[in-house]
């Protein structure tokens, strides 16, 4: 099991490693940097660096993790990359279905392929499907996601590179925002984050603020308007402390959302 330092998950599982860049959000890809380092450290799954590789031998790994947890699938790749055979994606979904005590978070930028394969996949309730969006040009990924049969749908605005206009989060279960980190990171404006946060509050969609990012992301922290934002979809397994706000009823399905203490926010 690989413990993760990513704030919105607990562990990572990488049955695919390596990727190719597809949009501006990929420019300073963390997975690429890490793959080069892991190759240098002699990690066998990264012997080809950032070239796409599938790893049949770890397909069953989550089945052996007894403690229920949140698992980020393919933090070092994109499961819906065009070079990942459909049969392999199916096997990943089969493991996720069998490991029903975990919650799996799958995040892609290949929303076209996600939608194309949607009806050929069986969507268990413990699979949270997300798309990454870095600016307005990629809002179409959200529309693709909405058309899938995934039972929990989320958006990751990370790295958020520009303000987002015309955001429609109807039928979306969770929104994450994060700034880019690392040596050449691009700056994220506070107002861009607030706009998305406020939209989530209005629409009653759980909002998670991951980080400001920057060269020293630890120093920049993850406080927005005086507090952290660690809201998660309401499922029976989520890693952060939550308080149910009964007056905030969800507009869809039977689920209601939960928020971390301190709601509503106060501006700085
Ligand atoms: S899709 Fe994700 S993993 Fe692939 S290059 Fe882009 S940022 Fe990196």
Image (spheres, rainbow, N blue to C red):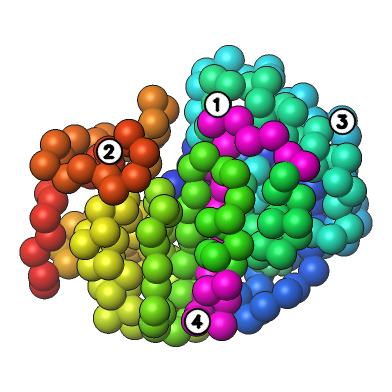
Residue 77 seen in the current view: no
Q: Position of residue 77 (x, y in %)?
A: 73, 55
SS class of the residue under badge 1?
A: loop
Q: Quadrant of residue 234?
A: top left
Gap between marks 3 and 1 measured at Cα: 20 Å
Q: Residue at x 86, y 46 (%)?
A: 86
Q: Nearer the viewer, residue 146 or 265?
A: 146
Q: Are marks 2 and 4 in contact (CB under 8 Å)?
A: no
Say which residue label 2 marks: 256
Say which residue label 1 marks: 102
Upstream in sequence: badge 2 or badge 1: 1
Residue 16 position (above or below residue 181): above
Say which residue label 3 marks: 57
Q: Position of residue 235 (x, y in %)?
A: 39, 31
Q: Residue at x 73, y 74 (%)?
A: 22
Upstream in sequence: badge 3 or badge 1: 3
Say which residue label 4 marks: 136
Q: Position of residue 130 (x, y in %)?
A: 55, 53
Disc sitting over residue 24 in the figure: none
Q: Which residues are magenta?
A: 120-140
SS class of the residue under badge 4?
A: helix
Upstream in sequence: badge 4 or badge 1: 1
Gap between marks 2 and 1 measured at Cα: 20 Å
């Amino acid at each position: 099991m690989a413990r993760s330092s990513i704030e919105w998950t607990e562990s990572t599982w990488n049955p695919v490693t390596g990727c190719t860049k597809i949009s501006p959000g990929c420019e300073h890809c963390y997975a690429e940097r890490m793959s080069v380092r892991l190759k240098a450290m002699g990690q066998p799954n990264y012997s080809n660096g950032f070239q796409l590789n599938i790893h049949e031998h770890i397909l069953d790994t989550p089945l052996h993790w007894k403690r229920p947890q949140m698992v980020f699938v393919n933090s070092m790749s994109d499961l819906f990359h065009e070079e990942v055979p459909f049969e392999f994606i199916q096997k990943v979904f089969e493991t996720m279905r069998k490991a029903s005590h975990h919650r799996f978070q799958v995040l892609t930028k290949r929303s076209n392929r996600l939608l194309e394969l949607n009806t050929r996949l069986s969507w268990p309730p413990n699979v949270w499907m997300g798309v990454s969006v870095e600016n307005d040009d990629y809002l179409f990924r959200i529309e693709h996601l909405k058309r899938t049969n995934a039972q929990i749908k989320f958006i990751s605005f990370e790295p958020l590179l520009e303000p987002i206009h015309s955001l429609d989060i109807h039928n979306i279960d969770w929104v994450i925002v994060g700034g880019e980190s690392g040596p050449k990171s691009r700056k994220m404006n506070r107002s861009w984050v607030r706009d998305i946060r406020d939209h989530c509050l209005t629409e009653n969609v759980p909002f998670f603020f991951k980080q400001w990012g920057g060269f020293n992301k630890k120093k920049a922290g993850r406080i927005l308007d005086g507090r952290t934002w660690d809201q998660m979809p309401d499922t029976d397994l989520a890693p952060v402390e939550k308080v149910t706000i009964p007056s905030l009823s969800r507009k869809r399905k039977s689920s209601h959302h939960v928020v971390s203490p301190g709601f509503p926010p106060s501006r700085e």
